[in-house]
Image (tube, coloured by chain):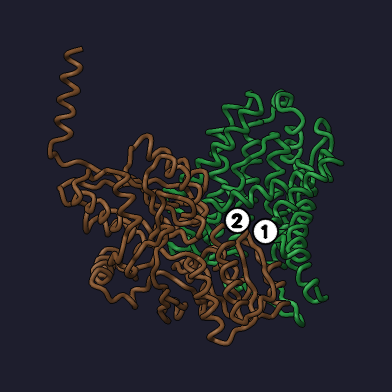
Chain colours: A green, B brown
Amino acid sequence: MDFTTFLQQMINGFSLGSMYALIAIGYTMVYGVLRLINFAHGDIMMVGAFLVYLAHAAGLSFPAAVLVGVLGAILVGVLTDKVAYKPLREAPKISLLITAIGISFFLENLFNVLFGGVPRAFPAPDYLTQVIHIGKLYLPTTALVIPVVTLLILAGVLWVLYRTKYGMAIRALAFDIPTVKLMGINADGIISLVFALGSALAAVGGIFYAISYPSIDPLMGIIVGLKAFAAAVLGGIGSVTGAVLGGFILGFTEILVVAAFPDLGGYKDAFAFFFLILVLLFRPTGIMGEDLERGRF
Amino acid sequence: MKKIVSIAAAAALMSSMAFAKEVKIGVVLPLTGPIAAFGQTSKGGLDIAYAQNNKLKNGDTVKLVVLDDRGDKVEAATAVKRLLDKDKVTVILGEVASSNSMAMAPVAEKAKTPMITHASTNPRVTRGKKYVTRACFIDPFQGAVMAKYALDNGMKNAVVVTDAKQDYSVGLSKAFKKAYTGAGGKVAKTVLINSGDKDFNAQVATIKAANPDIIAFTGYYPEAALLVKQARAMGVKAPFIGADGVGFPELVKIGGKDAEGFMYTDHFNEAAASSAEAKAYVDAFHKKYNKPADSMGALAADAYGMILSAMNACIDAGKASDDKECINANLRGTKGYKGITGVITINENGDAVKSAVVNEVKDGKFAYKTTVNP
């Protein structure tokens, strides 16, 4: 591999990694508060991307369509919490997990029935799909925009968590829900806020995913959701910064496997997940993860 | 006891009388999931063929039971089981993806139920099977056509892109490489992808470094569209050649102008349709869907037509229209069946021997280039 190709692969790893990181933040947020692995996260992502597609097809401009997509995803996320998760607040965690899987199947199949399973072309605007040439290197605009968005969102989420009253309530919920209720805080309202935030992040992730790879279908969230989940676990689930780190590690691993061993490229997922197992063997809580009974975020 | 006997006798009498029966054909297709376009277009063609003819010679009616397997191997095998156990179908039609047909074939074989796949081209689908037939050519032929076309146009240095998850792609790559290197071409590199993946930038960088004359892509259309887009964005200029897995409108819809010049081998192009059967089908297709007739639909219609013709042959021979053994024997013995996609003859392996066409994406449409005979 010559140096140019190597640099190009580094750019590719960075761009893919930032994509995973963006989606993993939302995953880890919801887990941090409810200790719920929200398997429907990838599907909320799909809902966000689909709503943008539909709104754009209905004649809205792209930015307006993005707004519709994010707001719609928030609505679906909060509604999911109210309908499916809230009645199970006191139930064992495993019931919640199974419900999350159920919601995931429900959303996938609902969109399958409504819109069919044939992939559709996502209307990515030209200004986001340009390619910048630097010498022999090719740098897609998204490879610049996505990391910036990811870092902005990371900063924003950390700000909300540590600098606002709501953030304090969210962190308190992560420790102990009944005690928070005793303090006179509207716990359900705060949980709704967490879902709204998580769904908005999922939608933003889904929209950027669809811009980078402009083909959307109702099952698009499954694989990328799984990867983002792996990234969140790798970084230490519950830790927002860890999710970003995990996303980058996963992205680089995948790209480097393909780059270094093209003959094994078909097994890149196996390598990525093998790496995940390796990390968990030595650090069961993930790279930045804390002991489950101590603080989070 | 007496009563039971008389009821049984009455039932036997009823069934032997010339009441018109209903014969069921079970259809398994990927109507949703990553390769949904295969299933949807197949169903589109099947619906037309069914509307044109759904009665047998003796007045029996044919009924289709269509199941969706979401493009999944396990679901495909389960669907066959359900069709056999619950719906009691006589014949099974499907799947498109070779991996899925291969999952279905053992189930049908075990139940001694004839199965015909309209579009699975991997040779292993019918290998060692007595009850599995196909209405399409196989990959060694298709791969040879790809290789010949590339070499005839002076492209002697190829990168092969294989979808490691699909038996179809693995087999087709092998066939292409054999024919290509055998005729003097050089395979610079083989690059692997996985169906369902969307990021191929790492593979594209490898392809770019190899600087080929042509990129032989043996996978399916969703990956083809994204790969060609990412390749062109990164400045790869070599043309692509694919096979029957890429010729779908989604290639153009998602690939946009980057898909221009994408060549592929296929079963059918309406521009080359000359027989009366093909013309009648194409007319009906235009009337119903108002778009060009695709190859998956034409193949599905042919498979359906072959089943009906086998059933009619059984009726002619004085057998019941749902006699599985007889239908299977007639399907496997198909000779010179005048189908929409050409004249179909089934060889001793259960594979169809027929011609292929080469198409190219031009101005967002699939332009016909040439026909290659076996």
Q: Nearer the viewer, residue A247 or A159?
A: A247
Dot 1: what SS?
A: helix
How crowded pointer 2 is (Cα within 10 Å; few <14, some 14-19, many 20+) is rated as: some
**Residue B350 figure quarter:** bottom left
Residue at image mark 1:
A266
Which chain is mark 1 on? A
Dot 2: what SS?
A: loop
- Residue type, mark 1 in image: Gly
**Residue B214 figure quarter:** bottom right
Query: Which residue appears at 32% of the width and 57% of the height?
Result: B46
Q: Residue furthest right?
A: A282
Q: Position of residue B157 (x, y in %)?
A: 65, 81
Q: Nearer the viewer, residue A61 or A84?
A: A84
Q: Residue furthest left?
A: B18
* Co-location on one chain, circles 1 and 2: no
How crowded pointer 1 is (Cα within 10 Å; few <14, some 14-19, many 20+) is rated as: many
Residue at image mark 2:
B165
Q: Position of residue B111 (x, y in %)?
A: 40, 39
Query: Which residue appears at 32% of the width and 45% of the height?
Result: B325
Q: Position of residue B82 (x, y in %)?
A: 41, 38
- Relative to residue B211, is residue B198 depicted above or below? above
- Direction from residue B296 to residue B178 in the image, left or right: right
Tag 1 and tag 2, C-beta contact below 8 Å: yes
Mark 1–mark 2 distance (CA, rounded to whole Å):
7 Å
Which chain is mark 2 on? B
Q: Quadrant of the C terminus of chain A?
A: top right
Q: Quadrant of the N terminus of chain A?
A: bottom right
**Residue A78 figure quarter:** top right
Q: Position of residue A38 (x, y in %)?
A: 64, 40
- Direction from residue A20 to residue B214 in the image, left or right: left
- Direction from residue B278 to residue A173 in the image, left or right: right
